[in-house]
Image (cartoon, rainbow, N blue to C red):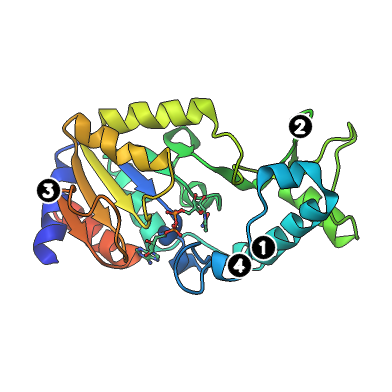
Amino acid sequence: MDKKVALIAEKIKATKKLVVFTGAGISTESGIPDYRSQGGIWDRFRPVYFDEFMSSRESRIRYWEQRMDMEKNLRRAKPNEGHMSIAALNDLGHLHALITQNIDGLHGASGIPGEKIIELHGNTRRVRCMSCKRLISWKEAEDRIESGDRAPECSCGGYFKPDTVSFGQAMPVEETKKAARLSSESDVFMVIGSTLLVQPASLMPEYARASGGFLAIINLSETPFDRKCDVLIRGKAGDVLKQILDRVRSG
Ligand code: NAD
């Protein structure tokens, strides 16, 4: 593993165009379960699809119950060594962009400036009206639920929903385009904690490769890119990223 860490660090040191792509795996060490691993969210819940959310109050109630269950972990979650190591690589001037599938807001909390973060699937700390698009804070939505409003609605009559992309819901066009462009611009593209199964997110490493970018993957389980990447590390994100950062810093 040492040689692989050294090679990634060497590539990062030589560029200001590092693009990091993260999935649920970077946040498991902050106590937020991923979806597909054993014991992950899908072992416990059937997801509510967007059309179900929009067409039935019962589904909206089920959705909010799942979201409130997730809040037990989210409330306590703090950026871990993995998030902080990426923020440090930004401070050192190497990070071009951070693209994430995560909705937990932990990259923002790690200190990476908002303009460098692309949240492909939105952010669950904001809540949006599905009709007039008005945003309210998570706190406001949570207060309403805790006072007995099981599926809060906007004053316009629309349904409030965390500002994330649900199954069956369209991807945000601008963010997706921007992520594709930034991936193509990268010299070094590093995937961390993602199965790379969900499109269009899974296309980003493809864009990076197509324009000659160096592709590194740090993940605990298999991905469809394992044989196509330049370096593959089967390790825990926090530990591996800290080692990479130490190497970059050691000059
Ligand atoms: P996923 O659940 O499909 O895969 C996570 C991957 O991370 C797995 O391959 C797993 O082996 C690996 N992993 C787990 N812990 C790890 C660690 N400590 N170090 C390295 N690798 C680790 O997640 P996904 O591919 O990101 O896609 C699922 C979707 O679920 C995403 O679209 C995302 O929006 C959503 N999601 C987000 C969160 C979050 O915001 N924290 C949590 C769960 C799901």
Give the residue number, with chain letter if any, for mark 4: 73
Image coordinates of residue 143 in percent, x first then y, are 83, 56
Quadrant of the rendered image containing residue 97:
top left
Give the residue number, with chain letter if any, for mark 1: 71
- Distance, label 3 to label 4, CA atoms, is 36 Å
Q: Indicate which label's residue lies in the foreground, 2 or 3.
A: 2
Residue lying furthest bottom: 39
- Distance, label 1 to label 3, CA atoms, is 39 Å
Tell me if the residue at label 4 has its CB under 8 Å from ligand 1. no
Q: Indicate which label's residue lies in the foreground, 1 or 3.
A: 1
Secondary structure found at label 3: helix
Q: Which residue is drawn at 43% across and 41% down?
A: 199
The answer to whether the residues at label 1 and label 3 have Cβ atoms under 8 Å apart is no
The answer to whether the residues at label 4 and label 1 have Cβ atoms under 8 Å apart is yes
Quadrant of the rendered image containing residue 223:
bottom left
Secondary structure found at label 2: loop
Q: Residue at x 79, y 50 (%)?
A: 141
The type of residue carrying mark 4 is: Asn
Image coordinates of residue 232 in percent, x first then y, are 19, 57
- The mark nearer the N terminus, 2 or 3, is 3
- Distance, label 4 to label 2, CA atoms, is 26 Å
Q: In this view, does 124 lie above or below 71?
A: above
Residue lying furthest left: 3
- The mark nearer the N terminus, 3 or 4, is 3
Q: Which residue is drawn at 29% across and 40% down?
A: 205
- The mark nearer the N terminus, 4 or 2, is 4
Give the residue number, with chain letter if any, for mark 3: 10
Tell me if the residue at label 3 has its CB under 8 Å from ligand 1. no
Q: Is residue 139 above or below residue 3?
A: above
